[in-house]
């Protein structure tokens, strides 16, 4: 069989809280992993021990240690910043640490439950923004169309970045935090409802929809799924007077995201290919 060459520890959501504790308290004692991705965490971390054993809580907020020789990349969706309280765990980049906050993304989304299970990596339609309320059909249906943002594309770039960091020592790119409003109580948004700052992608820089990690309601875990609201025809016509204008906008913003290291080149080609057949913008 294949020989393991590099081992990257990845924890998402509840497992991200456990990964924070592992990075901070366990890894320094055994050094099993070559690098880490902490994906969609809150501000705290899991207890070192809990009932029925003696409880050993961890502080909240819990900041990821930055003195390890192995790289740590934290990837946060919009939902995680306020919805999970991740804003309290924000910390600046360091030599072996990066934080990516990604506008237009949900803690969970349409890719997780609909597109991902059938994605083989070469289908441009995966890049199309859709509206669906089916968070887990037919069991969970949310009140609004769930988020269909670029979270999966950025996470693939994150994995590639950590792998390169381990192999060559070239650190993952830095990104600013998602911007907050004047009193730091909410995300700052543009005229179309998309968050400002953070990791930029064509989904928010050449938008066809308002993509948010917030504002969802409904049963079960719907609050984690964010929302998608396609822009109306008048707004799209103002943004993109012609299909060529739309294609050029997607090409430019996608190339910028690829060059910055936040989207993989192959995924960038899928995004651009989908723009050429999309019916989101008229002729």
Image (cartoon, helix red, strand yellow):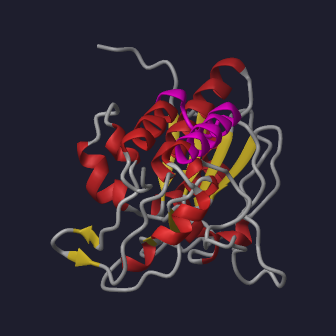
Q: Is residue 59 visible?
A: no
The residue under the point 78% across, 54% down is 176
Q: Position of residue 35 (x, y in %)?
A: 61, 35
Residue at image coords 74%, 44%: 97
- Whether 277 is among the magenta residues is no
Q: Examine the residues drawn in magenta and state their main secondary structure.
A: helix
Residue 188 visible in the current orientation: yes
Please, is residue 210 above or below residue 201 in the view? below
Direction from residue 210 to residue 141 in the image, left or right: left
Quarter the N terminus occupies: top left
* Relative image position of residue 78 (x, y in whole percent): 59, 66
**Residue bounds of the magenta highlight:** 245-266
Relative depth, front residue between 92 and 231: 231
Vertical placement of 173 versus 165: above or below?
below
Residue name at image x 47 percent, y 72 percent = 232
Location of residue 218 (image quadrant): bottom left
- 97 left or right of 120? right
Q: Residue furthest left?
A: 138
When asked about the image quadrant of residue 197, the answer is bottom right
């Amino acid at each position: 069989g294949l020989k393991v060459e590099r081992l990257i520890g990845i924890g998402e959501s509840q497992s991200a809280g456990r990964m924070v504790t592992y990075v901070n308290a366990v890894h320094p004692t055994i050094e099993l992993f070559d690098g880490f991705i902490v994906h969609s965490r809150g501000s705290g971390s899991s207890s070192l021990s809990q009932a029925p054993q003696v409880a050993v809580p961890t502080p909240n907020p819990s900041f990821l240690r930055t003195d390890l020789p192995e790289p740590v990349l934290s990837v946060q969706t919009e939902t995680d910043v306020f919805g999970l309280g991740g804003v309290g765990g924000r910390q600046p980049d360091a030599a072996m640490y990066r934080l990516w906050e990604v506008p237009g993304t949900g803690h969970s989304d349409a890719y997780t439950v609909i597109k991902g299970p059938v994605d083989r990596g070469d289908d441009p339609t995966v890049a199309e923004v859709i509206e669906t309320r089916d968070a887990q059909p037919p069991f969970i249906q949310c009140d609004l169309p769930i988020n269909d943002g670029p979270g999966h594309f950025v996470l693939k770039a994150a994995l590639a970045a950590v792998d390169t960091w381990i192999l060559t020592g070239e650190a993952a790119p830095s990104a600013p935090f998602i911007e907050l409003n004047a009193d730091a109580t909410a995300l700052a948004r543009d005229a179309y409802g998309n968050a400002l700052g953070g990791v930029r992608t064509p989904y928010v820089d050449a938008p066809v929809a308002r993509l948010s990690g917030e504002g969802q309601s409904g049963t079960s875990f719907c609050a984690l799924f964010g929302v998608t609201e396609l822009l109306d025809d008048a707004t799209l016509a103002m943004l993109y007077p012609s299909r060529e204008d739309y294609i050029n906008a997607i090409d430019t913003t996608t190339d910028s995201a690829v060059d910055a290291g936040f989207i993989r080149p192959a995924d960038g080609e899928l995004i651009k290919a989908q723009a050429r057949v999309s019916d989101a913008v008229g002729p």
